[in-house]
Image: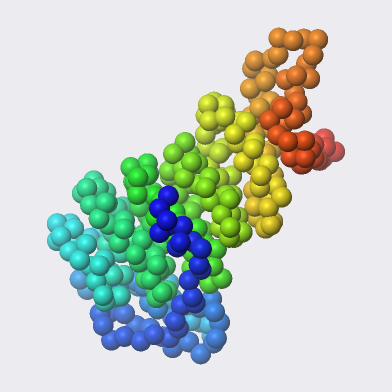
Amino acid sequence: MSETALRDLNTLPASDRKNESSSKGSFTKPYVGSANENVDVSLVSTHINGNETVNAVAETGNSEVEYIESENLNDVEDVDASLKMLVAGLDSKDWVVVCEALNNVRRLSIFHKESMFDMLGDVIPLVVKSLKNPRSAVCKTAIMTAADIFSSYNDHMIDSLDPLLVQLLLKSSQDKRFVCEAAERALVAMTTWVSPILLLPKLQPYLKHRNPRIRAKASMCFCRSVPRLGVEGIKEYGIDKLIQVAASQLSDQLPESREAARTLLLELQTVYEKLHDLAPTTVSENPEIGSWEHFCQSKLSPLSAQAVLRVTNIAREGLVIGS
């Protein structure tokens, strides 16, 4: 991982400016009287060729901008023209133009992914640039763009994943709720659409990051990805490696990390016992050699093994009592 990417993670960005105004393009930014930090007053949704506008919803005491969900995006009118103008739009100094270009990336990735595929190497760095933008409208639109890229291109964008992952972990860990929630949805899209065998090695370094909130988000992504390997995939990846990762998160500072670790350990215990049932130990006089307890004790330090067994035994006792 590059030193620049790690430096990006070490400092959380300053709060976005509020109530910015502009007369460019077709954007309208309503005045918000409330000092609510979770309200975004920048209208992200674009007006394309007079055919698509997106409404801002004004509620009593609370005005929030609506962004276009993926299922509500319309196709571009001219694919070739959109592709030709895409990079220049993404690199524009006009934030309205950037948002329009980001939404066009989303449209092209959904409706014309083959046409834009050869441009991903140029497009993704500019999406990352928008993720770093202090203007919340640009940032959130870029986050939604990243989610659509994951769902459309899957493993084909794995070589460009690192800078996106850095920024999404960062944005999902900040205090601005509407940006944080959008980034979390993008991370869910990533763990849904990118193969775990490729994704897990990318996530693992962040499990030891010095920022506990980054560690927590990475732990949650790791926990969601492992079950997608399946029983044989987990066996191939190495249950011993995975149990060591999960055990290291059990004592983490934030409860999200610890809960993700507990969930992962229960999954690994289930998979281990399924594999053991399929291939029972040949040492019939010592059946405990193939037990989960023996496995934990053989792969972990005494203290880590004790912590792991406490978690899995308590969960098992709960199941027995509830049955």
Residue nearer the viewer, 32 or 282: 282
**Number of numbered discs:** 0
Look at 74% across and 10% down and name the residue there: 283
Point 41% across, 74% down: residue: 134
The residue shown at (66%, 44%) is 248
Q: Give coordinates of residue 9: x percent, y percent.
A: 49, 61
Q: Position of residue 4 (x, y in %)?
A: 40, 59
Q: Position of residue 260 (x, y in %)?
A: 64, 48
Tell me which corner region of the image, top left, top right, bottom left or bottom right, holds residue 195: top left
Residue 196 in sight from this viewpoint? yes
- In the depicted structure, whether residue 7 falls above or below residue 58: above
Q: Can residue 319 be seen in this view?
A: no
Lateral position of residue 281 relative to residue 241, left or right: right
Residue 273, quarter of picture: top right
Q: Is residue 215 above or below residue 316?
A: below
Q: In which quarter of the image is the C terminus?
A: top right
How is the model colour-coded?
rainbow
Q: Please give left or right for residue 197 compared with residue 288 in the image.
A: left
Left or right of 322, for residue 219: left
Residue 66: percent from left, percent from top? 43, 72
Residue at (20%, 71%) from the top-left corner?
49
Q: In the orientation shown, which residue stands out farthest toward the front?
A: 3
Asked if residue 123 lies left or right of residue 210, the reply is left
